[in-house]
Amino acid sequence: MNFALSEQQAELQQSLARLVEAACNLRRVHAIMDGAEGFDAKLWAQLIEFGAAGTCIATEYGGLGLEMIDLALIAEVLGYQAAPAPFLGHALAGIAISRAGSAEQKSKWLPKLAAGEVLATVALGEGGTVWLPEQWTLPAGKPAGCFLFEA
């Protein structure tokens, strides 16, 4: 079994690494982490342009239509460089809607997520005040649905 990256996967990582290195040096990372900004909006805009916001979103919704391995390769580069961008939560929200959203939710939200028009994340929990994982009662593997809340 071959675990080596394909030529395209290696180029994806190298291109992304160059982008992040040019856009966000270590001083900027520290300034973001120590400040109130939350993330680097300029870097996030560049990642959107790169296609990262729509990594695992189907092409029919404007995403790249890539696989989970590609998401992991992007996350590896961003994590290695401590890139202050909301990539993971945003990507997971796209995956959640892709897999558990209604047709209406998919057509409404996936194009906006892929284009970076909205920023999203996920939250796990049950109804009411049950938010801690040890309080959850939904068995693993049982779909719970996809609920979207607009701020």
Image (spheres, rainbow, N blue to C red):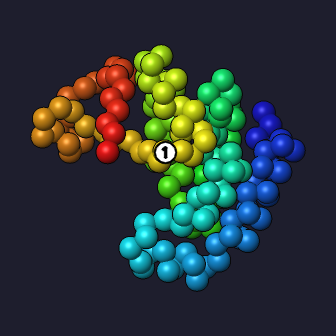
- Residue extending furthest toward the left: 129
| Count of labels in the image | 1
Q: Of residues 148 and 15, which is closer to you in this image?
A: 148
Residue that appears at 76% across and 41% down: 3
Residue that appears at 46% across and 38% down: 93
In which quadrant of the rendered image does the C terminus lie?
top left
Neighbourhood count class around disc 1 (C-alpha, 10 Å): few under 14, some 14–19, many 20 upward: few
Q: Of residues 141 and 92, which is closer to you in this image?
A: 92
- Residue extending furthest toward the top: 103
Looking at the image, can residue 136 be seen? Answer: yes
| Relative to 107, residue 96 above or below | below
Tell me where residue 42 appears, x and y as whole percent: 60, 65
Disc 1 residue type?
Val
- Residue extending furthest toward the bottom: 27
Indicate the quadrant where residue 22 lies: bottom right
Tell me where residue 18 appears, x and y as whole percent: 77, 65
In which quadrant of the rendered image does the N terminus lie?
top right
Q: Left or right: 125 with respect to 67?
A: left
Indicate the quadrant where residue 45 lies: bottom right
Looking at the image, can residue 79 be seen? Answer: no
- Give the residue number, with chain letter if any, for mark 1: 118
Tell me where residue 13 appears, x and y as whole percent: 75, 54
| Relative to 70, residue 12 above or below | below
Residue that appears at 38% across and 42% down: 122
Tell me where residue 83 appears, x and y as whole percent: 58, 65
Indicate the quadrant where residue 21 lies: bottom right
Q: Of residues 51 and 6, which is closer to you in this image?
A: 51
Q: Left or right: 48 with respect to 113?
A: right
SS at mark 1 in the image: loop
